[in-house]
Image: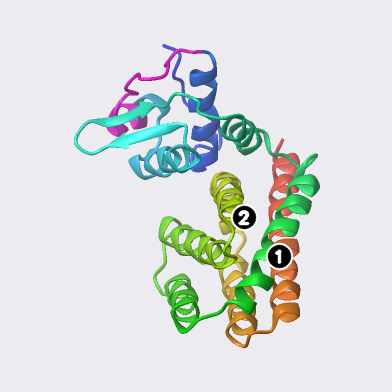
């Protein structure tokens, strides 16, 4: 009875928020198996693909654990970093978007600079493949997001610092919850591909300053697209 249809049901982040609320209220406790994808789709009155994307976000964030053939289970919180990232991912709003972008820029711009300094043919090829996948047609939102995430994580790994890589992974977990809402802005995918290509070109050329500048430009542009969705939601309300 606690699971009810949500507003703006086509957006996976609305389901993420609803599932999160149930976990925080301890309707589901650590170790509990949450309802199946089919049952959640019926309860929330949404498509199964929406449930699948929401659950995937919570798995990436470390809130749920997916076990093949069994289902998704609530994980035991393992660190303050996870707890903080969980709250940020759920509560990100227009009011604290600038704070998130500021932190993201400090981490990802430096990672891009280091990736350029450490670039190998393998890294360059990996980034190109991600961009090719993002530019493929037809492209569904989930596949686009997966390729986008792999692009940023590859750069974080190339920084050769496990702390950068871990923080970068946390950032991408938050991005996966909120930024897909920008895909409903028509030009988002084309501009995102173009911005990623500029980053990859600079990294492949070993241009540290250029890679950092291109990454910063991308993060600012992406945040502006997300801010547009917040404004649109206010207009709808």
Q: Is residue 237 left or right of residue 47?
A: right
Q: Position of residue 141 (x, y in %)?
A: 46, 57
Q: Residue at x 73, y 64 (%)?
A: 221
Report x, y in % for residue 136.
42, 75
184 in relation to 82, above or below: below
Q: Are marks 1 and 2 in contact (CB under 8 Å)?
A: yes
Nearer to me, 171 or 122: 122
Q: Name the image quarter holding residue 186.
A: bottom right
Question: In this figure, which residue is indicated by the disc labeled 1?
Answer: 110
- Looking at the rendered image, the quarter that the N terminus falls into is top left
Q: Total of numbered circles in the picture?
A: 2
- Residue 212 in picture, x, y percent from top left: 73, 72
Distance from Cα at disc 1 to Cα at disc 2: 9 Å
Residue at the extreme left: 69
Magenta stretch secondary structure, dominant: loop
| Numbered label attached to residue 132 | none
**Does residue 40 show up magenta in the picture?**
yes
| Start-end of magenta stretch | 26-41
60 lies left or right of 192? left
Residue visible at 59% across and 59% down in the picture:
161
Q: Residues within 10 Å of mark 2 (few under 14, many from 20)?
A: many
Is the residue 80 above or below the residue 103 in the image?
A: above
Q: Is residue 21 magenta?
A: no
Q: Secondary structure at mark 2?
A: helix
- Mark 1 and mark 2 lie on one chain; the one further toward the N terminus is 1
Residue 162 position, x and y percent, is 56, 54
Secondary structure under tag 1 reads helix
Q: Quadrant of the C terminus?
A: top right
Residue at numbered disc 2: 164
């Amino acid at each position: 009875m606690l699971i009810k249809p949500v507003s703006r049901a086509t957006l996976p982040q609305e389901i993420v928020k609803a599932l999160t609320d149930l976990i925080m209220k301890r309707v589901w406790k650590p170790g509990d198996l949450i309802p199946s994808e089919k049952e959640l789709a019926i309860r929330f009155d949404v498509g199964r693909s929406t449930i699948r994307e929401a659950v995937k976000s919570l798995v990436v964030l470390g809130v749920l654990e997916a076990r093949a053939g069994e289902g998704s289970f609530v994980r035991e919180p393992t660190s303050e970093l996870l707890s903080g990232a969980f709250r940020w991912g759920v509560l990100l709003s227009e009011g604290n978007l600038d704070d998130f972008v500021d932190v993201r820029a400090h981490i990802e711009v430096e990672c891009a600079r280091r990736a350029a300094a450490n670039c190998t043919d393998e890294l360059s090829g990996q980034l190109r493949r991600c961009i090719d996948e993002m530019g493929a047609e037809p492209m569904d939102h989930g596949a686009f997001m997966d390729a986008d995430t792999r692009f940023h994580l590859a750069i974080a790994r190339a920084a050769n610092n496990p702390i950068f890589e871990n923080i970068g992974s946390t950032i991408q977990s938050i991005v996966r919850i909120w930024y897909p809402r920008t895909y409903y802005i028509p030009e988002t995918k084309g501009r995102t591909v173009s911005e990623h290509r500029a980053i990859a070109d600079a990294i492949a050329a070993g241009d540290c300053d250029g890679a950092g500048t291109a990454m910063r430009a991308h993060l600012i542009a992406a945040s502006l697209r997300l801010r547009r969705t917040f404004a649109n939601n206010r207009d709808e309300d």
